[in-house]
Image: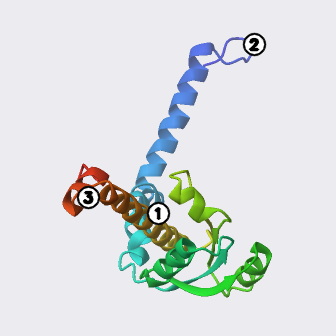
């Protein structure tokens, strides 16, 4: 619809926009390939993306340990890390730079650093940290390494708390209940 000067009338341009939009919308839903990508991929992709992670059979991931504390507690932590099913202590280093070399040469997929003063802080009930550097380019490896390290550190911490409570006179079952009042 035009006026006498050849210009489109305002209502006509909106009708054209609406018509073009409806034509495109129809084309989307009548094209099988486009419909498959829009709807099929939304349902199918998440299923197949997670399929390789289902068995979770990744075990004994080699990690490098930097023991800056050289204490009985740090040695116990290293033994516990090596005993965890996800982890295998591949090498021990005295400094982070040496561990980084092993990491970048793919001799280890993670570096666990136990800093100096770890045992003293833990015994004083201060925040004793353990640092984990992991290779996040392989999500499953990173996840299993992080999970293993976290579980070991939490187990060590719980054991220390339970022994403290028992030293104060609690029975083993009381100490466990006080350490983890909510079972989950």
Q: Is residue 47 above or below residue 10?
A: below
Q: Is residue 99 above or below residue 11?
A: below
- Please state the horizontal and vertical placement of residue 28, each as a whole percent of the image: 47, 50
Mark number, residue 95: none
Crowd around label 2: few <14 · some 14–19 · many ≥20 (10 Å):
few
Q: Is residue 67 visible?
A: yes
In the displayed structure, does residue 56 sit left or right of residue 76? left
SS at badge 1: helix
Please tell me which residue is depicted at 75% across the width and 13% down the height of the picture: 5
The answer to the question of whether label 1 and label 2 lie on touching residues, with beta carbons closer than 8 A, is no
Q: Earlier in the sequence, mark 1 or mark 2?
A: 2
Please tell me which residue is depicted at 44% across the width and 84% down the height of the picture: 83
Please tell me which residue is depicted at 57% across the width and 29% down the height of the picture: 17
Q: Quadrant of the C terminus?
A: bottom left
Spatial separation of the CA atoms under disc 1 and disc 2: 44 Å
- Please state the horizontal and vertical placement of residue 124, each as a whole percent of the image: 53, 53
Q: Which residue is mark 2?
A: 5
Comparing 122 with 54, the one in front is 122
Comparing 35 with 135, the one in front is 135
- Please state the horizontal and vertical placement of residue 98, each as a whole percent of the image: 78, 80
Q: Which residue is mark 1?
A: 33
Mark 1 vs mark 3: give the one in front. 3
Spatial separation of the CA atoms under disc 3 and disc 2: 90 Å
Q: Tell me the quarter of the picture where residue 51 sits.
A: bottom left
The answer to the question of whether label 1 and label 3 lie on touching residues, with beta carbons closer than 8 A, is no
Q: Is residue 184 visible?
A: no
Q: Which residue is mark 3?
A: 176
Comparing 155 with 32, the one in front is 155
In the displayed structure, does residue 156 sit left or right of residue 7? left
**So how many labels did they put on this image?**
3
């Amino acid at each position: 619809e035009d006026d006498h000067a050849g210009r489109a009338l305002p209502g006509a341009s909106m009708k054209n926009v609406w018509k073009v939009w409806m034509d495109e919308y129809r084309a989307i839903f009548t094209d099988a390939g486009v419909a498959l990508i829009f709807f099929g991929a939304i349902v199918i992709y998440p299923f197949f993306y997670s399929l390789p992670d289902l068995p979770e059979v990744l075990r004994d991931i080699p990690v490098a340990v930097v023991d800056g504390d050289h204490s009985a507690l740090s040695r116990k932590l290293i033994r516990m890390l090596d005993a965890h099913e996800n982890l295998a202590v591949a090498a021990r280093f005295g400094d982070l730079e040496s561990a980084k070399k092993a990491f970048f040469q793919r001799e280890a997929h993670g570096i666990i650093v136990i800093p100096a003063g770890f045992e003293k802080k833990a015994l004083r009930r201060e925040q004793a940290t353990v640092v984990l550097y992991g290779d996040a380019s392989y999500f499953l490896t990173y996840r299993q390494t992080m999970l293993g390290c976290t579980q070991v550190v939490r187990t060590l911490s719980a054991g220390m708390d339970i022994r403290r409570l028992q030293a104060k006179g609690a029975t083993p079952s009381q100490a466990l209940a006080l350490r983890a009042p909510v079972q989950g």
